[in-house]
Amino acid sequence: DARVTQTPRHKVTEMGQEVTMRCQPILGHNTVFWYRQTMMQGLELLAYFRNRAPLDDSGMPKDRFSAEMPDATLATLKIQPSEPRDSAVYFCASGLSYSNQPQHFGDGTRLSIL
Amino acid sequence: AQKVTQAQTEISVVEKEDVTLDCVYETRDTTYYLFWYKQPPSGELVFLIRRNSFDEQNEISGRYSWNFQKSTSSFNFTITASQVVDSAVYFCALSEGGADGLTFGKGTHLIIQP
């Protein structure tokens, strides 16, 4: 089965450090999503891309977060500088527009900022 | 703005009991999609079902069934003859486009006791 691949699976770093999370969407999927899961806020949409163009990043803190798709096989989410409140599980998902298929989620990156 | 409410934070039942998880949604769009995802203790998000707003037919898949009622803006999920392996957090979600970002409810933690 095709899967969305996220790396790293776990990341622990100190406050102020840059964090980069990577996502390889399912081949052929043209839409990529980033979500964040915390105990307090639950699952929130941060941003998403269609055909590599950003469609919506209104859920993302603009001052320290950035999301890009350098090519169709890679999406990145960067935090610089990181803060303890960024500790969460970050999920990437991919999907195909105008299809009956749902979004497929990766296993997530568990991020801890000390 | 769209919103998904899962009023039941946690449900605990004994194995073999039937259990219903409630989901109420809000949206201004006439075309939208509803989803259920399962998050087991291992943390991944597992897709269970997707329904579009034009299809109010109830669906059954093995021990799982879903009841979609537009009149009450509800999309409830029933597990019949529950099993310990059904223990997980279940999320209801809404999308105002088939391949757009999901708005999740806060989730219902389902505990099936042996």
Image (spheres, rainbow, N blue to C red):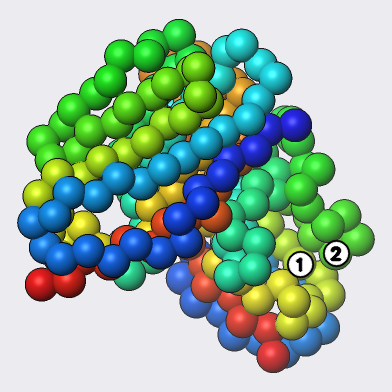
Residue at far right of view: A63
- Residue beneath the point at 66% across and 62% down: A41
Three-letter amino acid code at the position of disc 2: Arg
Near-viewer residue (A66 or B103): B103
Near-viewer residue (A81 or B88): B88
Near-viewer residue (B32 or B14): B14
SS class, disc 1:
strand
The numbered dot on residue A64 is: 2
Near-viewer residue (A81 or B100): B100
Q: Chain of mark 2?
A: A
- Residue beneath the point at 11% across and 36% down: B62
Rendering quarter of residue A31: top right
Can I make out residue B103 in this image?
yes
Decide if residue B43 is on the left or right side of residue A64: left
Crowding near the residue tagged with mark 1, few <14, some 14–19, many ≥20 C-alpha atoms within 10 Å: many
C-beta proximity under 8 Å, tags 2 and 1: yes
| Marks 2 and 1, how far apart at CA | 5 Å
Query: From the viewer's perspective, is residue B100 above or below residue A112?
Result: above
Q: Position of residue A114 (x, y in %)?
A: 69, 90
Decide if residue A92 is on the left or right side of residue A105: right
Q: Position of residue B71 (x, y in %)?
A: 50, 17
The numbered dot on residue A79 is: 1
SS class, disc 2:
loop
Q: Position of residue A78 (x, y in %)?
A: 73, 62
Three-letter amino acid code at the position of disc 1: Ile
Query: From the viewer's perspective, is residue B45 above or below residue A69?
Result: below
Query: From the viewer's perspective, is residue A79 above or below residue A101?
Result: below
- Residue beneath the point at 61% across and 81% down: A112
